[in-house]
Image (spheres, rainbow, N blue to C red):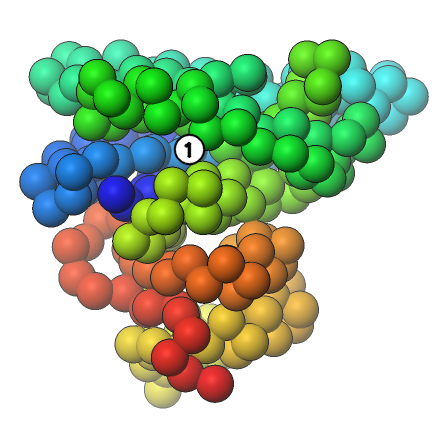
Amino acid sequence: MIVQKFGGIAMKDKKSREICIRHIKEGLVKYKSVIVVVSAMGRLGDPYSTDTLIQLTDAFQLAPESKDVAAICGELLSSSVLYAECLKEQIPCQLAYGVQAGIYTDDRFGDATIIKTSKKGIEELLQHIPCVIVPGFQGITTDHRFTTLGRGGSDLTAILLASLFDASAVEFYKDVPGVMSGDPKSSSNVQKLSHVSYQQLLNLCETAKHPLLQKKAVDMAAKHHVPLHIRHFGSSEEGTWIDSTIH
């Protein structure tokens, strides 16, 4: 089992998604099962990015539940598009969202806390097909209202599912080759690090303006010893591994 997480840049357009599908195919060859977690398409300014959707009206500031329902549309759309394109490429797969995804939260809309999980829905799907696609960033309350898991919540979705299904690792496909030794924008003498510890990544999450992963997600990975692999979505090269072997 492997969990693959594709961010907004990787999901942005058809050409990028073709690369994602290539990675999914490689994952299916190497592992028995693949759970794919996706973010909304693109970044602020792109039509279906989360930041664009929640700026449709300033009234969302007065209606946090309504804002969450709008926010999850980006991930629902990107997961449905990738699902259809995977089927077109003859990849046996299925969508899992809402109750089937099994991520239950409190009703703190905008930054909900996970209170319980159920692997039953995805587990039943994996008995029949090798690939399940899950929209990230979202959960449901016990009375089935949609919530969101905070900025970067799709990372938390991926690591939670990896923990539930005892996955070999979570592969995070980004627009960077991995964790770098410094800021490539301010220095040319920067190298990709092959391995970092959870604590090193947590330190980066706290200090970086745009952290590579959500801090809550890295906390969960460290707690459950889930290996992480941050790599460039446009390449098959090794990226940076994050696990318990370095302290």
Dot 1, how many residues are within 10 Å of its Cα: few (below 14), some (14-19), or many (20+)?
many
Q: Is residue 7 visible?
A: no
In percent of the image, x 15 and y 13: which residue is there?
88
* Pick the front one: 52 or 230: 230
Rendering coords of residue 187 (x, y %): 44, 82
* Residue 182 in the image: above or below residue 17: below
- Which of the 4 quarters of the picture holds residue 156? top right
13 with respect to 61 (left or right): left
* Residue 177 in the image: above or below residue 163: below
Rendering coords of residue 107 (x, y %): 80, 26
The quarter of the picture where the N terminus appears is top left
- Which of the 4 quarters of the picture holds residue 85? top left
In percent of the image, x 36 and y 26: which residue is there?
123
213 with respect to 193 (left or right): right
Rendering coords of residue 206 (x, y %): 66, 69
Disc 1 residue type (three-letter): Val
* Pick the front one: 227 or 20: 227
- Which of the 4 quarters of the picture holds residue 190? bottom left
Q: To which residue does mark 1 refer? A: 38
Rendering coords of residue 164 (x, y %): 45, 42
Which type of secondary structure does the marked residue at label 1 adopt?
strand
88 with respect to 109 (left or right): left
* Residue 230 in the image: above or below residue 118: below
